[in-house]
Image (spheres, coloured by chain):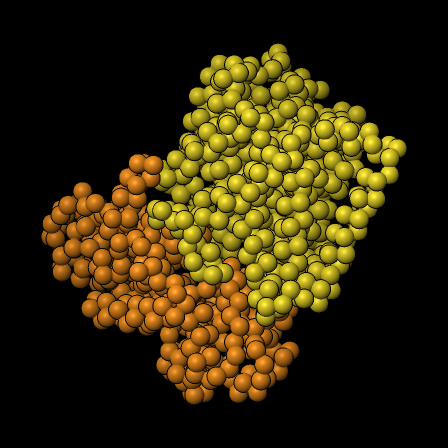
Amino acid sequence: MDAMSNLLMGFGDILTPFNIAIIFAAGLIGTVVGALPGLGPSAGIALMLPLTFGMPEASGLCLLTGVYMGTMYGGRITSILINAPGDAPAIITAYDGYPMMQQGRGAMALGISAFSSFIGGLFGLLVLIFLAPIIASYAIYLGAPEYFLLMATGLATVMLLAGKHLAKALLVTCFGVLVSSFGSDYVSGQIRFAFVPELIEGIDFVAIIIGLYGLGEVFYNLEKKVKLNLGKPGFRMREFIPGRSELGEAAAPTLRGSVLGTLIGIVPGAGATVATFLDYALEKRLSKKPETFGKGAIAGLAGPEATNNAAVPGSLIPLITLGIPGSGGTAIMLGALIMFGMRPGPLLMTTSGDIVWAMIAGLVLANVFLLLSNVLLIPVFVNLLRTVQGNLSNVVIALCVVGAFSLSYSPFNIWIMLIFGVVGYLMKKNDYPTGPFILAVVLAPLAENYFRQSIMMGQGSAGIFLDRPISLTILIIMALIVGLSVVGRLRPKRRALAAAEEGE
Amino acid sequence: MTFLSKAAGLAAIGISVVGLQAAAQDFPERPLEFVAGYGPGGGHDTMLRTMARLMEENDLSPVPINVVNKEGGSSAVAMGYLNAREGDPHYLMSITSSHIATPLTSNIGLDYSSFTPIARIGIDPELLVVNSTKGYESLDDLEAEDRMLNVGGTATGSIEHIVTMQLADETGMELNFIPFQGDGEVVTALLSNQIDFAITNPGPVADYLDSGKFNALAISTEERVESLPDVPTFIEQGADIKISLFRGLTAAPGISEEDRQALTDMVTKLFETEAWREEYIEPNAVVPLVVTGEEFADYLGETEAAYRETLGKLDMLSN
């Protein structure tokens, strides 16, 4: 196979002490950056960009992609340990990871998620290596109508995240749509609610996430005087290396998450985020014990974690085959490619194939390093948390403030974070689910813009959703799912039991 | 909400607390600061970082250079930041069309004349690009379609949109402009024939033009450009369109004439180097048409007038 020999050549290029050291360092830096709330892949890659000047191209790109992959591993750490997701794709990780932490199984949650991350990343890389050109040639036929339907499907998972009170969930969804509508709207060109210049580009949803989850949790815990159950200090392997039963429970969700993440990660914008939410919904549907979701279900942790790591190679596919960035992180990498004097586009693999293959080989190596370092570092993270647990609130607040500041290096986002910290506290205290809110904040503007773009492409007619084969297929599948679930509800028997547990 | 209005006051109006300092004879007396109004990795940021690196490598700056990102508000935040440095020549900010458009569409209390324009680095012409599989060879072929055509470009009120509106006026074609978010989405839409043609800068489509997947039918410059000698201008084909995206540099308001000259000399020396051509101009497909000083200020004035007219038609002016 051509790809195989190219890959081996790539390995030949990067297996020098300097490059191995770079890749190892990149993974560690990415893990730390991703673990800090607010600093996600975009910030990590941007921070490393100046360091790559003067490096050979392959080493520089390995550094950037290694950091990208590392942030996805790192994002889960603060989600699980302190319920403060660093970036949107890590939100769902907190749903079952943080409850595991509260039950004293935090180390195990970190262990399981490290393995799922590895498998997800590996799967995505295999697809990238062998199928990238084929996938890219189909991916270009996806356009605004398909993206809109995908975002709508993502928003529909609100129903699954709703918890006990559907009305409350719908209310916070509307609130999320309102919050997301701030700022300039590139479709109409109008600027909405920009009371200060910082709002021209809207409210940064990462500041909202940090406030809502990180700070909101601190306020709530301070009031309830919650004490984390951190167990006894320990460094025993079996506390954090998943055993046969855990792996058995995590295996199928991890594989499903890997496939979903690679495919949906290609979608520009919120690909990785939508993929994690869809995967969570899927796992909850397929699970034999859906009632454990949100209370520390291994499947609910492993699936989405595999998804967000698989999305990294997924988002690289359009970048290296077409020169089109699919995420904030790859947009910065596009800038880096240009600065290295390469020309991203359909000819990149022809003109700079050796460098791209070296970068891919570097990613494979980074993924292995990341698994090892993340598993070995678990006792460090857990015991670090234990040493600061008396002052945990202060530490979390400090991390949240630094994270919010770093979004645009200005105090503005600290205010946003504080406002949503109070909002998060009030929501939690009054039992309003936060998931539907944040999902609306992230997806509503995309859904809105893609819908209007679709109608414009149809020159005013909504028929475009039916004219395009892919969007028609998605519509039919959606209709089938809705139809089947209605039929399922009508049938009594075993469904009644599940419905009783899920509903009232 | 007092803190919000306070933040607004500081950022937008830019109270001049720094005051007049830095006497001319000892400029530069400390490191220079290059201000990017957008985040790391974007067009502004990569341009300034390339400039900083090449200026240090070629000993064009006697002092070190730091690049800072003051992102937010479609460059409004950076404008507020630089405006507050009145009289201090140690700052250079990269500007493009948002420097003109943002003050028109939102009320930030500043515009291009609140600064000291230094130099236009070059222009990014707009190309009319079609997918080669459609077989269009000229503007006439598009007109011959005789139906409403879908046009892709970035954002309503962008320079791509202005070109589209002018083209419709000039040729009588029925054009349906569809705003996309970013060049990547425009390229994808054209690749899969979701739009009939795109208005775009050469950079994002250069590779597609070389490989023959796309075909450029017109360019928005007054004369053909060196890098794309086979692409005819709109004017040649009877449509009077000559508007391009510019890339330039501006400095803080109220700096002395000597300092302005020193900054201008420093950057024009860089623009004459081979390294600048090889590492910035060519990879980014920029047409290097440098103008400096008052001539650049006049150019900004003309550009603002063109924007004001089109944005007025779109009802997008803030006042």
Residue A275 vs A248, above or below: the answer is: below
Residue in front for this viewpoint, A271 or A464: A464
Task: Please name the residue shown 63% across and 45% down the image.
Answer: A155
Tell whether B23 sits left or right of A148: left
> In which quadrant of the rendered view does residue B286 lie?
bottom left
**Quarter in which the C terminus of chain B is drawn:** bottom left
The x and y percentages for residue A181 are: 48, 49
- In the rendered view, would you say A74 is above or below A185? above
Residue B249 position by quadrant: bottom left
Which residue is most to the top? A232
> x, y (%) of residue A106?
63, 22
Q: Is residue B264 visible?
A: yes
Chain painted yellow: A
Q: Residue at x 49, y 43 (%)?
A: A179
Horizontal side of B242 relative to A149 (left or right) equals left
The location of residue B311, given as percent across then percent down, is: 37, 67
Observer-nearest of B142 and A30 = B142
Among all residues in the image, which is located at the extreme right? A493
Q: Which residue occupies the foreground of this view, B265 or B199?
A: B199
Please identify which colour was used for chain B in the image.
Answer: orange
Tally the marks.
Answer: 0
Residue A88 visible in the picture: no
Q: Against A86, is A231 above or below?
A: above
Which residue is rendered at x = 41% and y = 55% of the image?
A191
Q: Residue at point 53% right, 48% down?
A: A329
Q: Quadrant location of the N terminus of chain B? A: top left
